[in-house]
């Protein structure tokens, strides 16, 4: 069990921070699928919205949480059930600009934070190393929940956001009511990352190999090159998404964070073993290396046009989910699923929440 002092040291919290534990952590061998309950009333239906209907959040907030001063959007009733939506790379909170009001209209309190190194989220101390291990980002969200006095939430994400939500669901299931994970189980297995993959898979990860070079580092550190590179990634991973300049520029403002290049480079270099992580996160990363199962109610989503979607309609990662579970393949949609198909994503959140009530 991870006690209050251990977590506080890792997350940079004071002694008054809420305690978390790993008491709910299960291994694939010990976890058992949940029993199927009798059919309850169906979940609420989310009204259809045209992607791009909304362009901005009404207000943005800041809160000190752990190592960070976190910038986040919040919509919906203050005392509604909480949904935390987590963005990926190279994206920001605008991935949920249509999803959030759909959920808010159904009574959810929706919180959409900028991840470390993005937008208005900044480090509280100039002396904090600008690292980005997968567990560090997960601990950022735990600290945010503590700061906002959110005991439990539905977590939903894609890309970095899916990974972060998966980690919290695996290590701190008592904090997760339900999970929506685009691309399924994406907790990084660094040992596997050291081995070659199929050529087509390696091709999809071109920017990860680019970031491993001094040339790629320079491209991320030069703002104009960074903005151009990230836009190019959008076109590759979402081939059917006809976003306009204004849509991209709204998100690209988040890439001007002074720590952006350092965080992105660290994350991708750390994944493939080019750099070692901070010792404060070793305990968590050792647990994640075992690829822990996820027992909370879960819906996984596979966008059919996302080049990172694994073949097999979710079968390759199904074994990692041991609780109530549904899988959905979303036709004609690319990597940025919540922004490309907000109604589908919001409905999945509502349905996952409903799974938790079975």
Image (cartoon, rainbow, N blue to C red):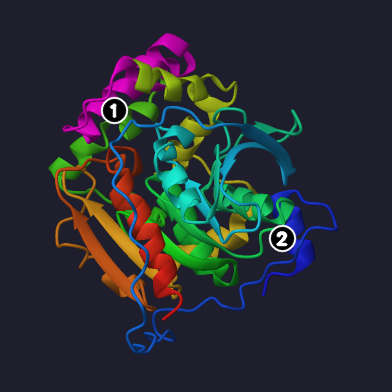
Q: Position of residue 339 (x, y in %)?
A: 34, 38
Residue density around tag 1, few if under 14, some if 14–19, many if 20 or more, within 10 Å? few
Tell me which residue sits at (40%, 54%) in the image: 188
Tell me which residue sits at (62%, 48%) in the image: 140
User: Mark 2 to mark 1: distance in Å?
Assistant: 35 Å
Whichever of callouts 2 and 1 sits on the residue coming sooner in the sequence is 2
Based on the displayed image, in which of its 4 quarters is residue 326 positioned? Answer: bottom left
**Of the residues tagged 2 and 1, which is closer to the observer?**
1
Tell me which residue sits at (43%, 40%) in the image: 96
Q: Is residue 106 above or below residue 219?
A: below
Q: Is residue 113 above or below residue 287?
A: above
Which quarter shows the N terminus? bottom right
**Residue 181 visible (yes or no):** yes
Viewer-proximal residue, 322 or 176? 176
Q: To which residue does mark 1 refer?
A: 233
Q: Please check the rendered image and state whether residue 89 is part of the magenta-colored stretch, yes or no.
A: no
Do callouts 2 and 1 mark residues in contact (Cβ within 8 Å)? no
Question: Which stretch is magenta?
Answer: 216-245
Tell me which residue sits at (32%, 59%) in the image: 184
Q: Please check the rendered image and state whether residue 228 is part of the magenta-colored stretch, yes or no.
A: yes
Q: Position of residue 218 (x, y in %)?
A: 44, 15
Residue density around tag 2, few if under 14, some if 14–19, many if 20 or more, within 10 Å? many
| Local SS, label 2 | helix
Residue 160 located left or right of residue 312: right
Viewer-proximal residue, 89 or 243? 243
Q: Position of residue 291 (x, y in %)?
A: 41, 67
| Local SS, label 1 | helix
Q: Position of residue 267 (x, y in %)?
A: 47, 39
Q: To which residue does mark 2 refer?
A: 7
Residue 331 located left or right of residue 254: left
């Amino acid at each position: 069990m991870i006690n209050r002092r251990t977590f506080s040291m890792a997350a940079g919290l004071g002694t008054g921070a809420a305690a978390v534990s790993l008491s709910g952590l299960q291994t694939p061998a010990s976890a058992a699928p949940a029993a199927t309950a009798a059919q309850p009333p169906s979940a609420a239906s989310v009204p259809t919205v045209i992607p791009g209907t909304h362009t901005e959040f009404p207000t943005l907030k800041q809160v000190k949480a752990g190592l960070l001063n976190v910038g986040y959007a919040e919509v919906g009733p203050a005392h509604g059930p909480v949904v935390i939506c987590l963005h990926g790379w190279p994206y920001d909170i605008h991935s949920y600009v249509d999803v959030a009001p759909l959920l808010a209209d159904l009574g959810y309190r929706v919180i959409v934070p900028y991840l470390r190194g993005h937008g208005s989220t900044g480090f509280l101390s100039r002396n904090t190393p600008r690292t980005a291990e997968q567990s560090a980002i997960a601990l950022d969200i735990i600290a945010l929940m503590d700061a906002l006095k959110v005991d439990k939430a539905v977590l939903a994400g894609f890309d970095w956001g899916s990974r972060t939500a998966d980690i919290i669901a695996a290590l701190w299931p008592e904090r997760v009511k339900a999970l929506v994970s685009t691309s399924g189980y994406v907790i990084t297995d660094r040992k596997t990352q050291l081995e070659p993959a199929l050529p087509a898979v390696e091709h999809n990860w071109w920017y990860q190999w680019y970031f491993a070079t001094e040339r790629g580092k320079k491209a991320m550190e030069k703002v104009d090159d960074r903005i151009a590179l990230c836009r190019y990634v959008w076109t590759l991973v979402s081939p059917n998404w006809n976003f306009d300049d204004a849509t991209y520029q709204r998100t690209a403002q988040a890439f001007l964070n002074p720590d952006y290049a350092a965080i992105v480079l660290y994350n991708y270099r750390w994944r493939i073993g080019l750099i070692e992580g901070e010792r404060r996160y070793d305990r968590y990363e050792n647990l994640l290396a075992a690829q822990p199962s996820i027992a909370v109610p879960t819906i996984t989503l596979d966008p059919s046009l996302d080049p990172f979607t694994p073949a097999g309609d979710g079968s390759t990662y199904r074994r990692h989910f041991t609780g109530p579970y549904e899988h959905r393949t979303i036709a004609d949609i690319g990597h940025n699923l919540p922004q490309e198909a907000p109604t589908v994503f919001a409905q999945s959140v509502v349905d996952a929440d409903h799974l938790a009530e079975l």
